Image (cartoon, rainbow, N blue to C red):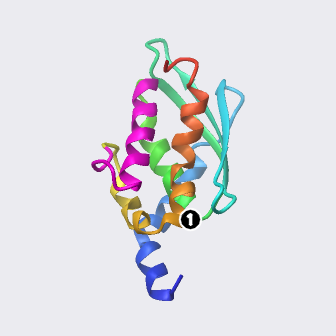
Amino acid sequence: MSARAAQKLYTPELLGLATGLAEFPLTEALPFRAEARSRSCGSTITIGLALGAAGLIAGVGMAISACAIGQASAAVFAQGAKGRDPREICAAARALEAWLAGEGDEPDWPGIAALFPARAHPGRHGALLLPWTAASKALSSVAA
């Protein structure tokens, strides 16, 4: 990747998002868990989620070893997940995949615009999808 392309990809907004991950530690109080790994770059995430009495996401935590794209994506996911129905999480994952493949509209998720520069870099799509992939796996038993 050229320095110019990297500069467009790694915007200050995108880089700043990763600093918010400390607000979402992975704890034992988050029983719905799953892991995901990007085949393209080797980034990994373990996500934990908790549901409230109404069946909506009440807690999010994660342990992530990823590039800035994966970290920013995890932060965007975590910041927008609370209060959502598990089916919404899975639908957002599918919408994000379709959008990255050029087959769908921009996903409806708060803060997602910060990740838009990564769309032009297919090698980063796996890292970008990590939190949604892991969350969909974690919630598969309740989102069916």
For the residue pair 18 and 113, the one nearer the viewer reads as: 113
Is residue 19 visible to us here? no
**x%, y% of residue 15?**
49, 67
Residue 80 in the magenta stretch? The answer is no
- Left or right of residue 65, residue 75 in this image: left
Residue 103 in the magenta stretch? The answer is yes
Disc 1 element: helix
Q: Is residue 54 above or below residue 19?
A: above
Direction left: furthest residue: 105
For the residue pair 115 and 59, the one nearer the viewer reads as: 115
Start and end of the magenta stretch?
A: 86-107
Q: Residue at x 56, y 55 (%)?
A: 126
- Left or right of residue 105, residue 66 in this image: right
Q: Which residue is mark 1?
A: 68
Q: Residue at x 63, y 61 (%)?
A: 40
- Left or right of residue 29, residue 76 in this image: left
Direction top: furthest residue: 53
Q: Amino acid at mark 1?
A: Ala
Mark 1, Cα crowd under 10 Å, few <14 / some 14-19 / many 20+, is some
Q: Is residue 128 above or below residue 10?
A: above
Quarter of the image where the N terminus is located: bottom right
Q: Main secondary structure of the magenta part?
A: helix
